[in-house]
């Protein structure tokens, strides 16, 4: 397991604590893991650098955790146990709007796993073989086929074209935090 935390020059203390707890939880369940922190001002480049480093290890999965996320200590182990190629969580945007990052395929289910059109890579686990099948750059930003896409939307669109399903853990999603920024005056 490669826990990839792309960042600029900072990782929030709460995020670092959550990553450490998850790493220890994985270790206690006999899952070897390493933490990779590619630093770049371009998030898509940071994600690309993290995957490149993970491919040089014996990692079976890449778990992306953005540098401003919080999660329970069992998050990575729970996602791994789903045994899916791409599985993650939706989470609130950091703008305070209450909107979420990601788009689920409409379903009647309120718990368990559901399919998503796309999820944010801020809390997303991907089997390493997906990257071996997918052409680089894996993450791209810009105008694609007439619409603007973020790097995670781009990844999910390409993965879907390769017939991968993007799965979302609805229960775990309720426990994911996204650290925002507020200016107090």
Image (cartoon, rainbow, N blue to C red):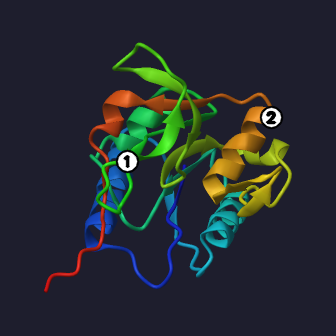
Mark 2: which secondary structure? helix
Q: Residue 93, percent across and down?
A: 38, 55
- Can residue 129 be seen? no
Q: Residue 167, percent across and down?
A: 54, 30
Name the residue tied to disc 1.
Answer: 99
Q: Nearer the viewer, mark 2 or mark 1?
A: 1
Please tell me in which quadrant of the rendered image residue 148 appears. Answer: bottom right
Write the residue at 34% across / 19% down. Answer: 110
Which quadrant is home to the C terminus?
A: bottom left
Extreme residue in the top direction: 108
Q: Nearer the viewer, residue 48 or 170?
A: 170
Q: Nearer the viewer, residue 118 or 79?
A: 118
Q: Earlier in the sequence, mark 2 or mark 1?
A: 1
Q: Residues within 10 Å of mark 2 (few under 14, many from 20)?
A: few
Real-space Cα separation, disc 2 to disc 1, in angstroms: 26 Å
Q: Residue 161, labelled with which disc? A: 2
Please tell me in which quadrant of the rendered image residue 55 appears. Answer: bottom right
Mark 1: which secondary structure? loop
Report whether 167 appears left or right of 53.
left
Q: Residue 2, percent across and down?
A: 56, 55
Extreme residue in the front direction: 146
Report whether 180 appears left or right of 137.
left
- Can residue 27 be seen? yes
């Amino acid at each position: 397991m490669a826990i990839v935390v792309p960042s600029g020059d900072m990782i929030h203390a709460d995020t670092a604590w959550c990553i450490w707890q998850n790493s220890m939880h994985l270790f206690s369940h006999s899952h070897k893991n390493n933490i990779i922190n590619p630093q770049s001002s371009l998030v898509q480049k940071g994600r690309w650098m993290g995957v490149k480093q993970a491919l040089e290890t014996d990692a079976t999965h890449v778990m992306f955790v953005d540098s401003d996320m919080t999660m329970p200590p069992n998050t990575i182990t729970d996602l791994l146990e789903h045994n899916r190629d791409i599985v993650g969580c939706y989470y609130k945007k950091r703008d305070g709007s209450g909107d979420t990052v990601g788009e689920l395929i409409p379903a009647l289910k309120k718990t368990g796993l559901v399919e998503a059109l796309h999820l944010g890579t801020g809390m997303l686990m991907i089997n390493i073989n997906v990257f071996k099948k997918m052409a680089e750059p894996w993450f791209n930003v810009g105008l694609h086929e007439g619409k603007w896409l973020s790097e995670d939307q781009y990844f999910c669109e390409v993965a879907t074209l390769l017939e991968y399903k993007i799965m979302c853990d609805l229960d775990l999603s309720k426990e994911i935090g996204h650290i925002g920024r507020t200016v107090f005056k």
